[in-house]
Image: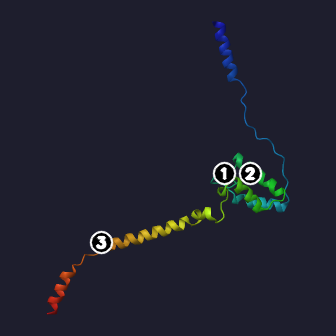
């Protein structure tokens, strides 16, 4: 019985000390860009949203996905891809959400014009509310009594 307990404790102890496998970011080969390409790369990143952070651009984010996307964009630019091709690749893969300024099209009308629509609805509601409040505040006029008074004064 003591031997069984000792073996069980030894097994549990060895499991506790087992090496933990961790994800290690593999070192990627450096991509060298020309000064013009580097300038394009630096100009493009602030216009792209980090998919993990969502409120940071790819230029500012330190999330692993942002690092991978920066590497991918750098690779595409080094291979001669235009800014349009890079953005198209990213939107095809991740959707319009990755762009801080998505294109105006049928899918993004609500995004672009929704605030104006809400403002118009709010102004119409405010106008109707103030008109209704003025109508309630104005004293009701009894037209029959008013005619009788006018007729009496005319005689």
Looking at the rendered structure, the secondary structure element under dot 1 is: loop
Question: Looking at the rendering, in which quadrant would you find the N terminus?
Answer: top right
**Among the two numbered marks 2 and 1 on one chain, the one whose residue lies closer to the N terminus:** 1
Looking at the rendered structure, the secondary structure element under dot 3 is: helix
- Binning the other alpha carbons within 10 Å of mark 3 as few (below 14), some (14 to 19) or many (20 upward) gives few
Q: Residue furthest bottom?
A: 155
Is 104 located above or below residue 57 in the figure?
Answer: below
Looking at the rendered structure, the secondary structure element under dot 2 is: helix
Q: CA distance from mark 2 to mark 1?
A: 10 Å
Q: Which quarter of the picture shows residue 16?
A: top right
Q: Are marks 2 and 3 in contact (CB under 8 Å)?
A: no
- Which residue position holds label 3? 136
- Binning the other alpha carbons within 10 Å of mark 1 as few (below 14), some (14 to 19) or many (20 upward) gives some
Q: CA distance from mark 3 to mark 1?
A: 53 Å
What mark, if any, has residue 69 been given in the picture?
A: 2
* Left or right, 129 with reference to 142: right
**Among the two numbered marks 3 and 1 on one chain, the one whose residue lies closer to the N terminus:** 1
Is 90 located above or below residue 154 in the figure?
Answer: above
Image x and y of residue 98, in percent: 67, 56
- Binning the other alpha carbons within 10 Å of mark 2 as few (below 14), some (14 to 19) or many (20 upward) gives some
* Left or right, 132 with reference to 144: right
Is 61 located above or below residue 21 in the figure?
Answer: below
């Amino acid at each position: 019985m003591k031997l069984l307990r000792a073996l069980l404790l030894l097994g549990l102890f060895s499991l506790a000390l087992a090496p933990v496998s961790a994800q290690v970011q593999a070192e990627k080969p450096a991509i060298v860009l020309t000064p013009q390409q580097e300038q394009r790369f630096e100009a493009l990143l602030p216009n792209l949203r980090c998919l993990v952070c969502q409120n940071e651009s790819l230029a500012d984010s330190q999330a692993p996905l942002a690092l991978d996307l920066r590497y991918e964009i750098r690779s595409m630019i080094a291979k001669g891809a235009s800014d349009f091709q890079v953005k198209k690749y990213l939107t095809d893969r991740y959707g319009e959400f990755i762009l801080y300024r998505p294109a105006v099209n049928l899918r993004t009308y609500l995004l672009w014009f929704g605030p104006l629509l809400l403002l118009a609805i709010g102004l119409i509601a405010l106008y109707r509310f103030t008109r209704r409040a003025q109508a309630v505040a104005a004293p009701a006029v009894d037209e029959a009594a008013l005619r009788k008074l006018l007729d009496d004064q005319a005689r």
